[in-house]
Amino acid sequence: MTSFAAGRVRQYNLSEVRYPRMKCPTSPRLAAMCFGEFLGTFILVLFGTGTVAVTILFKAHVGLLQVAAVWGIGVTLAIYATRHLSCAHLNPAVSLGMVLANRMRAGLLPWYIVAQLAGAVAAGGVILMLFGDSIAGYEAAHQITRGTPASVQTAMMFGEYFPNPGVVDISPVVTMGTAAMAEGLGTFLLVMLVFVLTEGCNVGRPADGSTPVFIGAAVAAIISILGPLTQAGLNPARDFGPRLVAYLAGWDHVAIPGPRGGFFTVYILAPVLGGAVAAICFRFLVSRLMGGREKVCCGQDDPCDVSTGSNAGTTSSSQQPPAGN
């Protein structure tokens, strides 16, 4: 790359370029970030768990694709609603990826995760209030006693289970190892797609204003593939928040740790590891390969700007759309 300064020409490598990370915010700015993560995660989880609930209770949707599409729409709307506040990570795996990719200061990570979990818990509580009577009626009609293994059929409205209890015609055989691999791979794909779709050096990326639509579509596509195996959580906050609500509402050990156990390994640890690997691969491999193209990537001084990737375009906008589910 060539720099023109004071009439002199200087050659330097893209690897020498340093971009600003998210700055340490003031108290009002930090409050706005936390509220953005809370609200965005609330919207995402409300749409997602809501569509699962109405599918089970009322057969409102037919087939996995319809459920996945509503999830994707929820992700898209959540990003549009909050990316000006917090850059809309809405997912602890994404936030950790931002830190590992040097896009966000590590000190912000606990605040983001707490806000995301709070939003997910709030959404789970709203789902319980909206559909509590209908759930009770469904359990009575199907002779399901809450807290027994059979109640996984209603608990799946809140947390995820493997194999997907909603797949009744052909029950897939899914071990804990397979489930963890599916969740890790799905989150890897999601976080990697967030990075490449918003990378300033990616000449094929969509326009900033339409990026949330593509991220929502990515979520829907991943759910369409992994849903029969694990319900495709891809987001520790999305799983644990509503799962905690179910635990407190009487599902007991069916909610935590689940009838087969392993919810922490499959739905929290595996997505976190998948997102971390994606961030590291992007930072040290993909972004460097993209940097070889003859295109200048300019960091901006906005707190929501992300250097070479994930969650923001670096040449045209300082907004950061995320990954959700």
Image (cartoon, grey):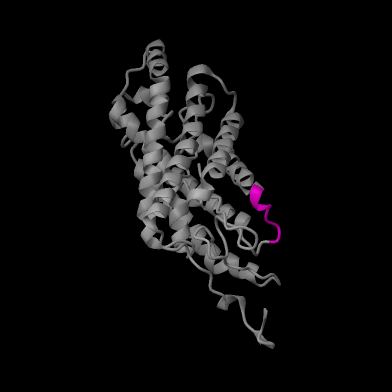
Q: Position of residue 93 (x, y in %)?
A: 44, 51
- Does 258 sit left or right of 197 as displayed? left
Whether residue 207 is in magenta: the answer is: yes
Name the image quarter holding residue 24: bottom left
Vertical placement of residue 80 versus 128, above or below: below
- Number of numbered markers: 0
Q: Position of residue 276 (x, y in %)?
A: 46, 58
Q: Residue furthest top?
A: 141
Vertical placement of residue 206 versus 62, above or below: below
- Tell me what residue is drawn at x 56 percent, y 78 percent: 16
Magenta region: 203-209
Q: Quadrant of the N terminus?
A: bottom right
Q: Does the rendering let one see residue 267? A: no
- Tell me what residue is drawn at x 63 percent, y 68 percent: 297
* Front position in the image: 124 or 189: 124
Q: Position of residue 91 (x, y in %)?
A: 45, 47
Q: Does the rendering let one see residue 6? A: yes
Q: Position of residue 148 (x, y in %)?
A: 31, 23
Q: Main secondary structure of the magenta part?
A: loop
* Front position in the image: 104 or 257: 104
Whether residue 99 is in magenta: the answer is: no
- Tell me what residue is drawn at x 68 percent, y 52 percent: 206
